[in-house]
Amino acid sequence: MTLPAPFENLRLPVIAAPMFIVSTPELVVAQVRSGVVGSFPALNARPSSQLDEWLSQISEETDGCGSIFAVNLIVHKSNNRLEDDLKVLERHKVPLVITSLGAIPEVNAAVHGWGGMVFHDVINDRFARKAVEKGADGLIAVAAGAGGHAGPQSPFALTQEIRSWFDGPLALSGAIACGRSILAAQAMGADFAYVGTPFIATREAHAAEAYKQAIVDGNAGDIVYSSLFTGVHGNYLRASIKAAGLDPDNLPEGDKSQMDFGSGGNTAAKAWKDIWGSGQGIGAISSIASVEERVAEFEAQYRSARGELARRTGMD
């Protein structure tokens, strides 16, 4: 498919995932300036009045760039800021809104009203169909291995099912931490790779140095999949769970009715402040770098993988 105009000049087919606490204007601006789509959760702006300031700053500092930025809205009923935050996004004509934990036609209509697009994140085909029926322009397939909230399905299975009926913009999330994986996401039928964890280990990320180093030092075996911390299943670093005095191999199920995204969790140890989210792809991350250095690394790996694939398949 031909991608919408805002995505025509990307350096790489990458949308940076919005990360609770971690994604702030400094990170988003660096991502956009590096040629990928930058994003942040609206709930990161605290107090809520700060959201207007953040959007002004990001808009000013990315003016003229070939990429765009996105804002993530939690549309679950636990988010009592949704209506007010949506009004702020409307004032700034935010070009891309990423919705999570529910699909609401009125939200989609509001974004369309100011000329924006809505991508909704989903963990299975059933939710994908509902999102499109309710007006989403694009989908983000959050597959097994993704950092933070993640689904249990293989990226092969999830992408295959969605692409059997949906030909709109599709991003794929799930352990994508190098340029080769970005190319693989496209090979499976996605238009974009949805990348989060590698941007935690950057100098611009609003994360503790110990968190960044844990990303560098870790591998897939250090990731624990649990619903305890927010009521929704997600992937977290084993070491941070142990540091909170919990047994990562014997965690109880979380109570979805107690979800509280305003404080980042429903246990004494808070996600994402104390319990650190991470995808399974961290074995590919070997250093803390600037965002520009990380994207340049992705680009070199991506181009190398394309050349290698052409040689293997005999295709130009």
Image (tube, helix red, strand yellow):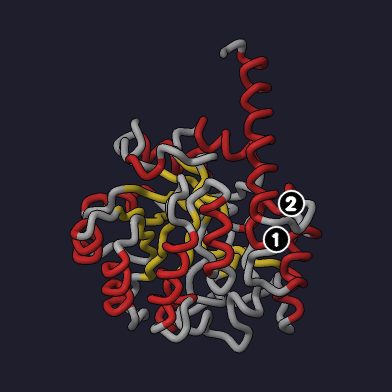
Amino acid type for the residue under numbered disc 1: Ala
* Secondary element at image label 1: loop
Quadrant position of residue 217: bottom right
* Label 1, label 2: how far apart the Cα atoms are: 8 Å
Question: Tag 2's secondary structure?
Answer: loop
Query: In screen coordinates, is 305 left or right of 33?
Result: right
- Residue labelled with disc 1: 201
Q: Residue furthest top?
A: 314
**Is disc 1 surrounded by few (<14), some (14 to 19) or many (20+) residues within 10 Å?**
many
Is the residue 232 above or below the residue 306 in the image? below
Instruction: Please tell me which of labels 1 and 2 falls first in the chain.
Output: 1
**Is residue 100 found left or right of 134 in the rendered image?**
right
Q: Residue visible at 50% across and 56% down?
A: 38
Q: Position of residue 197 (x, y in %)?
A: 63, 58
Q: Nearer the viewer, residue 149 or 111?
A: 111
Q: On the rendered image, what quadrant is the C terminus found in?
A: top right
Q: Which mark is residue 46?
A: none
Q: Residue at x 46, y 69 (%)?
A: 57
Residue 286 position (above or below residue 296): below
Between 187 and 239, the residue placed more toward the observer is: 187
Relative side of 6 to 197, left or right: left
Q: Which mark is residue 285?
A: 2
Where residue 271 appears, x then y in whole percent?
58, 77
Image quarter hosting the N terminus: top left
